[in-house]
Image: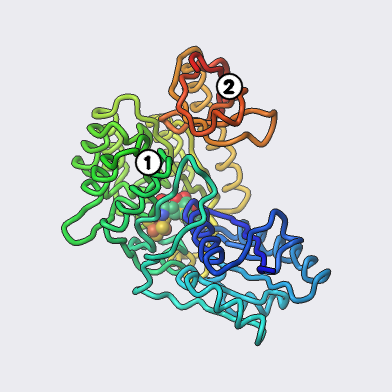
Amino acid sequence: MSRTYWVETYGCQMNVSDSELMEGVLTADGYRSVSTPDEADVILVNTCAIRDHAERRVLGRVAELNRVKKNRPGVLIGVCGCMAQRLGERLMEQADYVDMVIGPDAYRSLPQIIDEASRDGGVVDIELNPAENYEGLEMRRASRVSAWIPIQRGCNYRCTYCIVPYTRGDEKNREPGAILAEIQKLADEGITEFTLLGQTVNSYRFDGWNFARLLRAVARVPGVRRLRYTSPHPNDVTRELVEVMAEEEAVCAHLHLPVQSGSNRVLKRMARRYTRKEYTQRVELLRELIPHIALTTDIIVGFPGEKEEDFRETLDLVNEVEYDSAFTFKYSPRDGTPSTRMDPETFVAPEVAQRRLEELIKAVREIAARKNLAEVGSTREVLLEKRARRGNLLQGKTETNKAVLIPGPDEWLGRYMKIALTGTTGATFTGYPIER
Ligand code: SAM
Ligand code: SF4
């Protein structure tokens, strides 16, 4: 009987993609996936370290998974990803039921790590390896409709709040030939939507290639019908890149462009390396060349030193740009990041940060709802991606990355359909197909 595994994923798209990689490595080694953790011999939890809240949730979940081990001794529990990298051995000291602590650069050796843990007990492998390029590893992809393609790992920016450069190491870019070959193969298998992934994906460089050149080349791979990328850094949004986005039909009219704050003072303390004006100039360029583009963003409130007037500037920016949606976060101090060493007197009181967060969420939602309401009554091309979790509906996305729910059979999954938008909850649309 082959051994079984269960992989659970928290955090960003890079983690979703990394989990597909781990599943691929295990499948290639003869492991079989199961549909609940209770049936698994090996349980892997792929974690996020970006905020304290996310880490605590995951620790709670790992403790809960210990019940599987109690029922079936011999089951192995592994913690992978950024939290594993950040905490290393400390994780095992805190939770002695954890058998493996596995950083992102060790996934290739998963079968050996598992063997070692079952033979000798606890294994910690968190070495960052600049030479690990992940080439030659086949992913076990969850979707036959759209694919995540990591083109870059790590990050060379050092935003003062962020743990990523410490958990993922310096930027590493994949060879363009390998990226194009992988996408061609998946397109040949029928996948039509691709999302290029990297922490600052548009800073991609390899020999004579920059990101604009790579994006154009991918857009021209036969079978690629929708192409996205995330997350870009505003500094690397060049005119050349926006021109490629505008010219290449496959590149979708949506960009997730993290801004973090609308205040120059705060942006500087965050070491984001752009001013508000430089950011909005990029927004203007995107809208000039791609008028129907949807823009989304990430915003942090309560960063050390953020005064009420700084927060007002963030609200003002949100109203100026009119984002289609935004991920909003309360600043969470991460050990070892430069922001934790700022003058404690500048730290924002938790209740103030909470109030700002609520005010920001309200502003973001109002704008999103207003924009989405204006789209009700129109027809959009929707790629039907999966069955929705509730209501026996299919879920798809517009070119601008907006979720649409429609009634329909499973045979429609993977199809592009013209959908009349009939309503919106503010964030998601309902609709019906106007042609079959
Ligand atoms: N590399 C991407 C970028 O630069 O936009 C994403 C980094 S992170 C996975 C996603 C978001 O988490 C960031 O854009 C930021 O808004 C938020 N974030 C990162 N560190 C944080 C912290 N210490 N506290 C609160 N939010 C944080
Ligand atoms: Fe973190 Fe900044 Fe790098 Fe994004 S660009 S991963 S926020 S350090």
Q: Is residue 283 visible?
A: yes
- Residue 361 picture location, percent across and down: 55, 36
User: Is residue 45 found left or right of 380 in the rendered image?
Assistant: right
Dividing the picture into quadrants, the one containing residue 312 is top left
- Residue 58 picture location, percent across and down: 65, 60
Asked whether 289 or 379 is in front, the reply is 379
The three-letter amino acid code for the residue at tag 2 is Thr
The residue positioned 35% from the left and 73% from the top of the image is 130
Q: Is residue 269 visible?
A: no
| Residue 228 image label | 1
The residue positioned 76% from the left and 61% from the top of the image is 38
- Residue 354 picture location, percent across and down: 60, 46
The three-letter amino acid code for the residue at tag 1 is Arg
Whether tag 2 and tag 1 are in contact, CB under 8 A, the answer is no
**Up-down relation of residue 420 to residue 196 (above or below):** above
**Up-down relation of residue 212 to residue 405 (above or below):** below
The residue positioned 34% from the left and 25% from the top of the image is 292
- Residue 67 picture location, percent across and down: 80, 66
